[in-house]
Image (cartoon, rainbow, N blue to C red):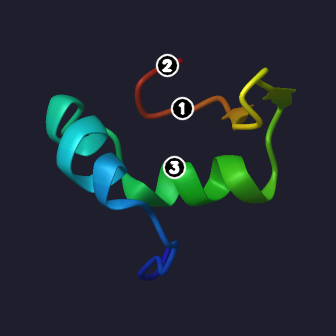
């Protein structure tokens, strides 16, 4: 897979990715494009899930 160009918030870059350095941006892009499951949270944010073969989850 080539480079990803997904926009993220500053909070995501400075807090989420710093706490979870194992997460790859390409996984996030895959989840946004073709989620196995999607849930809209009460605050309007959308959670998307995929299965990542590389980590077995």
Residue 19, image x, y percentages: 18, 29
Residue 29, image x, y percentages: 59, 60
In the rendered view, tell whether residue 34 sits above or below residue 46. below
| Pair 1/3: label in front | 3
In the rendered view, tell whether residue 12 sits above or below residue 46. below
Residue 49, image x, y percentages: 69, 30
How far is disc 1 from disc 3 in space, using C-alphas?
Answer: 10 Å
Given contact means CB atoms under 8 Å apart, are the residues at marks 1 and 2 in contact?
A: yes
Label 3 packing within 10 angstroms: few (<14), some (14-19), many (20+): some
Residue 45: which quarter of the image?
top right
Depth order, front residue of 56/25: 25
Secondary structure category for the residue under label 2: loop
Q: Earlier in the sequence, mark 1 or mark 3?
A: 3
How far is disc 3 from disc 2 in space, using C-alphas?
Answer: 13 Å
Label 2 packing within 10 angstroms: few (<14), some (14-19), many (20+): few
So how many labels did they put on this image? Answer: 3
Q: Which residue is mark 3?
A: 27
Secondary structure category for the residue under label 3: helix
Residue 21: which quarter of the image?
top left
Please indicate whether residue 7 sits to the left or right of residue 50 in the image: left
Q: Which residue is mark 2?
A: 56
In the rendered view, tell whether residue 39 sits above or below residue 23. above
Q: Earlier in the sequence, mark 3 or mark 2?
A: 3
Residue 23, image x, y percentages: 33, 40
- State whether residue 22 appears in this view: no
Q: Which residue is mark 1?
A: 53
How far is disc 1 from disc 2 in space, using C-alphas?
Answer: 5 Å
Depth order, front residue of 18/1: 18
């Amino acid at each position: 897979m080539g480079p990803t160009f997904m926009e993220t918030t500053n909070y995501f870059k400075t807090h989420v990715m710093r706490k979870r350095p194992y997460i790859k941006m390409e996984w996030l892009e895959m989840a946004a494009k073709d989620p196995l499951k999607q849930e809209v949270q009460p605050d309007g944010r959308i959670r998307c899930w995929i299965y990542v073969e590389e980590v077995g989850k």
